[in-house]
Amino acid sequence: PHPRPSGLADALLDAGRQTGLRVKPDQNQPEHSGIGYLQANIDRRGRRVSAARGFLDPIRGRRKNLTIVTDTQVNRVSFAGRRAAGVCCTQGGKTLDFRVHRGGEVILSAGAIQSPKLLQLSGIGPAGQLQSLGIEVVQDSQGVGQNLREHQLIFLQFRLKHQADSYNNQFGGLSLAKNILKYLVFGSGPMAYASSEAAAFVEILPGARRPEAQLMFSPYSLDLDTPGHMSFEKEPGMQLYPYLLRPTSQGSVMIQSADPNALPQIDPNYLATDYDRNVSIGMVRYVRRLVGQEALRPYVVSETKWTRDAQTDDEILDAFRKYGQSGYHASGTCRMGSDAAAVVDERLRVRGVSGLRVMDCSVCPEIIAGNTNAPMMAMAWRASDLMLEDWKQRLRG
């Protein structure tokens, strides 16, 4: 949990109680609903424990069967017949061809945007689309790049009465220099904290039997008049941004060229269903009710200019279109399943070929109802067990 909870965050938890939410001491508890401080994978020195730091660093240079190559772009998977034989890459303007050892496998872990792109560039995807781009079809797989699910959030920001309750003045000028020094020397201060301090999981629509929205609290506010450039407001502020946990809208990721450097066409298709629109409208109203509770009145002045006038259903949806953004949780584009449109099977093997697996958020049939980092690490751990089982089975066979 947060090493130095603020009075503002404590007040938010009290406001949650006043709306009927239970306060959760651990967000990983089986009972999903409630409000509480977030857990973060940050060590005692204030460093984020990424998958590379947690799993690769301890064995870096200690295993003869491990070679780590960086600053290298993977362009496609190469095949010998219908079996994956390696990957073609570019490094410093040079083309490299990494080959797998006999009986080995290629595992794509490039995420829900890049993994389907790589499969399509490698000849695995909708045959018509690939042929139109001059790519030789290895496997006609209509589901590659489809079923894109993403959390769309909207920044609901609120002006605060006191600068001491906001981090807005901590990331510029002398304060920024001081906080960088504090982080480098002691591993402490705002630079060592997660971007959000607390979260709530709440039901929105009448009759809902499980949380439909996640609300994330951060003790700072952004200048939303400068899209694409993150800058903090000069006045004190906070944000509570909500997002729909299980969107039913489905988008796509499709290559438009056989050139590996060309960007794919990404269509998130946000708010395409009545359910997604209704929950999105409801969660904005929920945040406003939460912030209006007695516990937060000593802190909050009002909602800021960007969204405060969005009051009707249509105005709220327009605000999503103007200020909404990705939650960076893209999933589903190499969906696991047993039907004809599924891209990978229950052991993450790409259907229709051999020696090739995918392991990242793209394999999820639906998006994870929450943050994706820790669940993906757990899935990868389980995936390694499956691969070892299959490898041992091949040795016995």
Image (spheres, grey):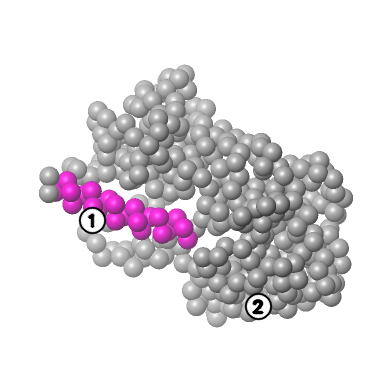
Residue 267 sits above or below residue 8 on the image: above
Q: Main secondary structure of the magenta part?
A: helix
- The amino acid sitting under disc 1 is Asn
Q: Position of residue 309 (x, y in %)?
A: 87, 50
Looking at the figure, which quarter contains the N terminus? bottom right
When asked about the image quadrant of residue 80, the answer is top left
Q: Position of residue 219 (x, y in %)?
A: 71, 68
Residue 38 sits above or below residue 258 on the image: below
Give the label on residue 298, or none: none
The secondary element bearing badge 2 is classed as loop
User: How far, Cα to Cα, is label 2 from label 1?
Assistant: 44 Å
Rate crowding at label 1 as few (under 14), some (14 to 19) or many (20 or more) other CA atoms within 10 Å: few
Q: Is residue 114 at all visible to an observer of this figure? A: no
Q: Are marks 2 and 1 in contact (CB under 8 Å)?
A: no
The mark nearer the N terminus, 2 or 1, is 2
Q: Is residue 145 at all visible to an observer of this figure? A: yes
Give the residues in magenta: 374-395
When asked about the image quadrant of residue 91, the answer is top left
Tag in front: 2 or 1: 2
Question: Which residue is rendered at x = 32% and y = 41% of the image?
Answer: 349
When asked about the image quadrant of residue 363, the answer is top left
Give the label on residue 5, or none: 2
Residue highlighted by disc 1: 65
Question: Which residue is rendered at x = 47% and y = 43% of the image?
Answer: 365
Question: Which residue is rendered at x = 63% and y = 36% of the image?
Answer: 269
Q: Position of residue 99 (x, y in %)?
A: 25, 41
Looking at the figure, which quarter contains the C terminus? top left
Relative to 177, is 58 on the left or the right?
A: left
